[in-house]
Amino acid sequence: MRNFSKRPVSRQFGFDRGQPIDRYFIEKFIEKNQHLIKGKVLEIGENRYTSLFGKEIDSVDILDIDLYPGVTIKGNLETGENVPDGEFDCFILTQVIHIIYDFKEALKNAMKTLKPGGVLLVTFPGVSQSCKTREYGDYWRFTGMALYRCFSEIDTAGDTRIESHGNLGIAQAFLEGRAVHEIPKSLLAFNDPHYEVVHTVAVTKKNPHPQINGEET
């Protein structure tokens, strides 16, 4: 009989062992869409992905609910308080929405920050251990089907590309807190839609005044 472990090897998602498995897929997603990280960019908490993958950057702002060194905008995505309106060409929002209870309002407000034609690069957990702390809650896990429904209900969401990543082995390793270097590369390359570990979404904000024959309607 197989021995089942009562405890993970890491309760920090594998951060203390190397690159977390979900971050492997997230960074592949950001790299794939790096041509969209340009102009005026907004990121949450730090400018990690803008600095790694951004091209032709005019400026970078950092949004968070609290002020600390590096944060340029103290705003609340859930309530919309002090959230900029129509200012950014790209908003990078990774693994944040699940810690916000009213996630639908948070996504609407995330879209609000963008200029028409701007792009939201956002990721969501599927299968995952909890990240609940004294400072933050942990409310949601998502399926690809739920995300399709959710974005279809946001009026400002235009072209939306949703991808889900994972398989049984990836889900097991991620729940255990394994890091990327501890699992075979062949496992990372295989996708099984029955085991959605992480979701990546690129959504473009609609232009409220589309042009026809060079003129706005």
Image (cartoon, rainbow, N blue to C red):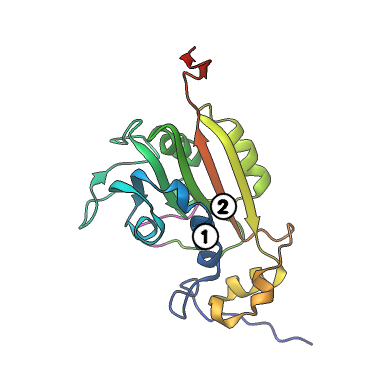
Q: Residue at x 67, y 68 (%)?
A: 189
Write down the residue under mark 1: 26
Residue stretch rendered in magenta on the structure: 133-139
Q: Is residue 138 magenta?
A: yes
Side (left or right) of 106 relative to 183: left
Name the amino acid, label 2: Thr
Principal secondary structure, stretch drawn in magenta:
loop
Question: Looking at the image, which residue sits at the far left?
Answer: 69
Name the amino acid, label 1: Ile
Sort mark 2 into few (<14), some (14-19) or many (20+) by Cα contacts within 10 Å: many
Q: Please report contact status of discs 2 and 1: CB closer than 8 Å, yes or no.
A: yes
Q: Is residue 178 visible?
A: no
SS assignment at label 2? strand
Write down the residue under mark 2: 200
Q: Is residue 79 magenta?
A: no
Nearer to us in this view, 72 or 97: 72
SS assignment at label 1? helix
Q: Earlier in the sequence, mark 2 or mark 1?
A: 1
Spatial CA span between label 2 and label 1: 7 Å
Nearer to us in this view, 69 or 140: 69
Q: Provide residue 211's location: percent of width, then percent of height.
A: 50, 18
Question: Looking at the image, which residue sits at the far right?
Answer: 1
Side (left or right) of 163 relative to 121: right
**Quadrant showing the N terminus:** bottom right
Nearer to us in this view, 156 or 88: 88
Sort mark 1 into few (<14), some (14-19) or many (20+) by Cα contacts within 10 Å: many
Residue 96, label in figure:
none
Q: Provide residue 21's location: percent of width, then percent of height.
A: 55, 70
Side (left or right) of 135 relative to 69: right
Tally of numbered tags: 2
Q: Provide residue 32's location: percent of width, then percent of height.
A: 53, 56
